[in-house]
Amino acid sequence: MLLHLKTWKDVEGYLAKSRGIIVPIGSTEQHGPNGLIGTDAICAEVVAKGVGEAAEALVAPTIAVGMAQHHLGFAGSMTLRPSTLIAVVRDMIGSLARHGFERFYFINGHGGNIATVTAAFSEIYAERSLEGGSNRPSVKCKLKNWYDCASVKAISRELYAESEGSHATPSEVSLTWYAYPEAAQTMTMAPPVAPRGTFTDADDYRRNFPDGRIGSNPGLASVEAGKRLYDAAVQELAADYRAWVNAA
Ligand SMILES: [Zn+2]
């Protein structure tokens, strides 16, 4: 149930039954030698669409560019600075809240978004608290990383163990290939498992992780794994969404 494929009359009808909406958020950034630039946005979008179908919930347009300054050393990567992303999240929620939406369930595909989106939620709550005495309906936001689902982590561990890593993982690459099988590119990585470590800005990242990966071997990705991960994430997040949106 994608918001952008509904009419305003449809949305008005939906609001009579539910005040919840799912917001996919990802990133547009390098994902190693065989991962798509859109990996994080694609993963969040396809999982959110599946959750929306399973839970009969509306899904907002994907926020496809996130906070990814550290990836700018690689061609095609884009970032919103934290202050810009906070403004985007505030304005999107503010627009939807005006129509009566009250529960905003973010499905996230990018670790670099977490601090900024959490700060955006705090800005929204602070604005309401400082106004005081408002009788407007409550607004509640929640952020879930699809890759942190217990069922997803169990599959990643079973299939990839120490080769999963933390960036350009075989799990996320598999999920994008499940969504777009024509993008699948199996290749041998050198070294097979990428280095691990920390980073600060884009130049520091490129020095430490020359092909873009961190601790992973996306050469092990497959469409079949992507389907298992998709099914697990959709099932777990749909149950979580339903329980959350129906709670007070
Ligand atoms: Zn990613």
Image (spheres, rainbow, N blue to C red):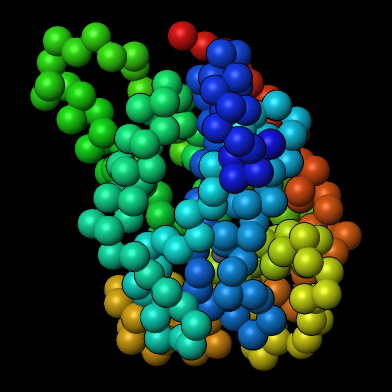
Q: Give percent across and percent down for residue 209.
A: 48, 83
Q: Quadrant of the N terminus?
A: top right
| In the image: residue 80, left or right of residue 154 | left
- Residue extending furthest right? 224
Residue 45 drawn above or below residue 218: above
Image location (x, y in percent) of residue 142 = 45, 32
142, above or below 129, in the image = below
From the top left corner, tell me how far across and down residue 116 is, in percent: 32, 51
Residue 159, visible in the rendered structure: no
Give the side of residue 126 with respect to residue 41, left or right. left
Q: Quadrant of residue 234?
A: top right
x and y, in percent, of residue 71 in the image = 42, 77
- Taking the spot 46% from the left edge, 9% from the top edge, the residue there is 248
Q: Is residue 161 left or right of residue 116?
A: right
Is residue 156 something that shows in the picture?
yes
**In the displayed structure, would residue 215 be above or below residue 242?**
below
Q: Which of the pair 90/210 is nearer the observer?
A: 90
Q: Is residue 153 left or right of residue 207?
A: right
Observer-nearest of 40 and 87 = 87
**Residue pictured at 59% horizontal, 80% vertical:** 32
Q: In the image, is residue 38 above or below residue 208?
A: above
Q: Residue at 35% across / 46% down in the picture? A: 89
Q: How many marks can you see?
A: 0
Viewer-closest of 38 and 164: 38
Q: Residue at x 60, y 13 (%)?
A: 17
**As rendered, which of 119 and 94 lies closer to the eye?**
94
Q: Quadrant of ligand 1?
A: bottom right
